[in-house]
Image: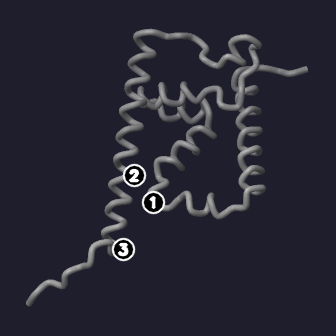
Amino acid sequence: MSTPVRAAGTAPDRWRVRIAQTALRGAAAAAAALAVAVLHDVHDPGVLCPLRRFTGIPCPVCGSTTVFIEAGHGHWLAALTANPVTVVAGLGLLTAPLGTGARWWSLSGGRRNALLGTALGVSWLWQLNRLGVHLS
């Protein structure tokens, strides 16, 4: 008996490519996190966010570098608590080849902007609370 030959570009082949792309993205992100963690251990530059450095008030994406440093050290809970929005966005980017972005891009521009604005607002409130900044 002969084995049926699949045409190039069949669904299983596309999924293999998508899984390989996701694994490659994950490996690149892991290598970057390790490199940032080592670099931070050798030379801690202090606060990188210009807004936080000059005003003491964190921006919505403050903690994103800390996410990579903590992930590079294998401290997953510390990475998550540094900036959960960055973790979720990073996972979304890593898994994009699996089709996770299709739903995102199917949203209307207004809904997408509202979702981004809400995520940034929640992230900013998280950072203010995490760093003990009270605006009054």
Q: Quadrant of the N terminus?
A: bottom left
Q: Is residue 131 left or right of residue 11?
A: right
Judging from the image, what secondary structure is the residue with disc 2 in? helix
Q: Relative to 15, does residue 126 appear above or below in the rendering?
A: above
Q: Relative to 134, does residue 118 appear above or below in the rendering?
A: below
Image coords of residue 39 (percent x, y): 41, 16
Image coords of residue 66 (percent x, y): 54, 25
Cα separation between marks 3 and 1: 12 Å
Q: Amino acid at mark 3?
A: Ala
Disc 2 and disc 1 in contact, CB within 8 angstroms: yes
Q: Relative to 4, does residue 42 appear above or below in the rendering?
A: above
Image coords of residue 61 (percent x, y): 65, 31
Q: Amino acid at mark 1?
A: Leu
Whichever of callouts 3 and 1 sits on the residue coming sooner in the sequence is: 3
Please tell me which residue is depicted at 18% across the width and 85% down the height of the picture. 4
Q: Is residue 81 left or right of residue 96?
A: right
Q: Nearer the viewer, residue 90 or 8?
A: 8
Image coords of residue 12 (percent x, y): 32, 71
* Residue 110 in which image quadrant: bottom right
Residue to which mark 3 is pinned: 11
* Residue 54 in which image quadrant: top right
* Residue 22, label in figure: 2
Q: Amino acid at mark 2?
A: Thr
Cα separation between marks 2 and 1: 7 Å
Q: Quadrant of the C terminus?
A: top right
Cα separation between marks 2 and 3: 16 Å
Q: Residue extending furthest right? A: 136
Judging from the image, what secondary structure is the residue with disc 1 in? helix
Residue to which mark 1 is pinned: 98
